[in-house]
Amino acid sequence: MKARAILLSILYSLISIPSIAEQVRIFTTTADGKKQLEYTTAQSSRSKLSRHITLQPATVYQDMDGFGYAITYSACYNLLKMAPDDRRAFLTRTYSRTDGYGVSYARISIGCSDFSSTEYSLCDTPGLEHFRLHTDETQYVIPILKEILAINPDLKIMAAPWTCPKWMKVKSLTNRVGYDSWTSGSLNSDYYEDYAQYFVRFVQAFAAEGIPIYAVTPQNEPLNRGNCASLYMPWAEEAAFVNKLAPAFAHAGITTKIYCFDHNYNYDNIADQEDYPINFYNALDPNMDGKELVVGSAWHDYGGSVTELDDINQKAPDKEVIFTETSIGTWNDGRNLSARLLTDMKNLVYNTVTRKSKAVMVWNFMLDLNRGPNLDGGCQTCYGAVDIDQNDYHTLSYNSHYFVMAHASLAAQPGAKRIAASIANGTSDISYVAFQNPDGSYGAVIFNQGSSSFQMSMAVTTAAVARFTLPAKGIVTVVLGGEEEKDVRLGGTTIGSTKQLGCYKGTIEAEQLGDLEQNFIDNPEEWLIAPDFFWYDASNEKLVFLPVSGTYEVEIDKVARTLLALPQKGSGEGTGIYICGPANSIGRTFYYPGTETLPENAIPMAEVEDGLYESSFVVGRQLNDDAVDFAFYLKSDLSEMFSGKTTADRYLVYDQTKGSSYFALGKGTSGHADGHIYKRTSNRHLKEGSMWTVVVDIREGIKGGAVYIREYSTPTSVEEPQSTSHTIQGERIVYNVAGQRIANSKRANAKSIYIIKEGDKTSKIMK
């Protein structure tokens, strides 16, 4: 009987364990920068480790609205300087719920901020009939917000003014002299209703652009008189104004939330402004229309202690709190990840979210390396969450604020509930905050301020267990459950994920001109497919492989929507021909920057026939016309460079009969580096967006090979087939609809008909 009881006990315990393991997704960032949102996946285990976090979904705290960045004019200016493909990939990786980190909140200004193009309001001429959006909004902020909303339609946007229109200002409410200054001053109480309608028009103007405003605050930093655009608005004046604003919203059918205060924990050390939110709530008209829209208070951390939120929550337990601004800059070693990462995670996420904060936002999303653009009188020493190199508007440097908001967003989807958790065998160096998400998954941000790494596990009570490594001085976001990640397949091969979210790398066996089955290109028009390696046949929805048959390494980035390939592998692994150049000259196909002459930035050329290699590029995307300077290498490690000198053991000759006279091959004289392609004259420029193909012909050997570069024009019409192929300079060539070469002379049955014009020649290709 005892044995039977033991057996039944074991069976019942097995029944209680899920039969299907759940997916575990892990993201890791370390303060030394060696891991930056490094991504791994696994299936959950049934066994937990001694150092274990137990999630307790029965104990629920606040709902979460999200985490995010301020989308200022300066941030948008820099973003719009990026190449569209780069910007889309960067925004997708940041904001996408499915292919990115899922950042879900943004803060914008109503009118100017200290990171605008100039000081302005949305009604600089007296009278609301003159209300209009400024070019900062129409040409910068709105276009970027639309791009982000297309990626994440659930993005929440909050807005705050830095100042009211100057014609609404007085020196103070006790001295009602007009105050013609962007800095300081008070809102004339005679204009409370007009200013409320100003907010209404702002919300409506953005709604007309398809951009909903989720929340507002009446004034950014109402106790700060010193900003280049500012307005002094103590609690009594803010309450009096909101007594007009809330009814104005209600009567206009606007449901935008209103948060008060939007300033520091220490109330800027102004004694009669202590407990600003509590005094504000008490001064509101309890009978006003729209009173339900006034939901809570917003906070910055430029002064005081986060413990002030404990006092506010105790005195107003029915009101929300959110955190809306903090900065990094020269004063706090803001670009030093080792100094900032753990401190910012603790201060911005752990200390606020565990005090009921429903949202956390940081200041500028993106600035350039000169901390701009910005305005005199504003912050001249601030860094962005991301800094972009203004010399190329391509190279990005990620700071602590980017990683902190991304880690938190991965753990807590909008609508997530913060839940309780406990740790077994924890240490004082380990902190964590946990969430239950609307899709049924569980997320936790766990960070380690100590110098020792730990093997840890996490589970919801007794269910599936996530196991992970918590590195020293590192942050880990663990997501347990949720939608399973779909396998990426190409050519019948499963391609494994890399350490970057949405990126995959693996090897395939490919046959020249053979079809490759795939399951990741949903809309080929949005994908950037290496044109010398692949052709997407839209009519048959097939991906065709172009180079010589063999084993190839492929890279797939579902976020940047790129498909790349590396040269043939096997005997002599890593051999082939590569193009590489110094900063700003030529970049790896489509996505990766060619910032230095390094192997990882080399562009692989496709071998389309034995000994015949080609690589296509687009001016302004892969090639910088103002900095043409690239060379050819025999191996991927760039150890064997081709020369332009006929005395070298491997050299190329530029064949101008087939190539453009715009280019030439240097021989180490007249300032032109040996073996480098350069511009013959600085007075000629390649057309932005034009496509060119580099061909290296070493069919007769690597001594005296030919190199030439030619342009293919975009087709202008389609005609009925008259022949099965065409010949240009002795080669049979097939093109796709963009005018790109899609196959070599071995292909006899092109799948489309296009007219290709090269000089005076017109050629037809049979379907």
Image: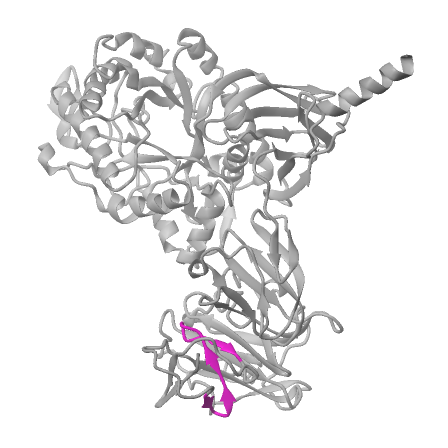
531 vs 137: above or below: below
Report whether 255 appears left or right of 737. Answer: left
Q: Can residue 210 be seen by looking at this rendering?
A: yes
In the displayed structure, would residue 429 be above or below residue 508? above
Q: Is residue 200 left or right of residue 275?
A: left
**Does the magenta run of residues contain 525?**
no
- 183 relative position to 752: left or right: left
Residue 172 in which image quadrant: top left
Where does the N terminus fall, quadrant-wise?
top right
Q: Is residue 185 left or right of residue 503?
A: left
| Residue 743 sits above or below residue 252 on the image | below
- Count of labels in the image: 0
**Quarter location, residue 605:** bottom right
Which of 429/63 is in front? 63
Q: Bounds of the magenta span?
A: 726-743
- Residue at the location (45% across, 19% down)? 304
Q: Nearer the viewer, residue 421 or 514?
A: 514
The image quadrant where one finds the C terminus is bottom left
Q: 163 or 635: nearer the eye?
A: 635
Q: Nearer the viewer, residue 457 or 724?
A: 724
Relative image position of residue 628 (x, y in whole percent) = 46, 73
Reply yes or no: does residue 742 show up in magenta. yes
Residue drawn 38% across and 14% down? 319
Whether 431 is drawn above or below 545: the answer is above
Q: Position of residue 166 (x, y in %)?
A: 16, 31
Could one spot residue 452 in this view of the protein?
no
Q: How is the image coloured?
A: one colour
Image location (x, y in percent) of residue 54? 67, 21
Coordinates of residue 109 in the picture (x, y in percent): 30, 35
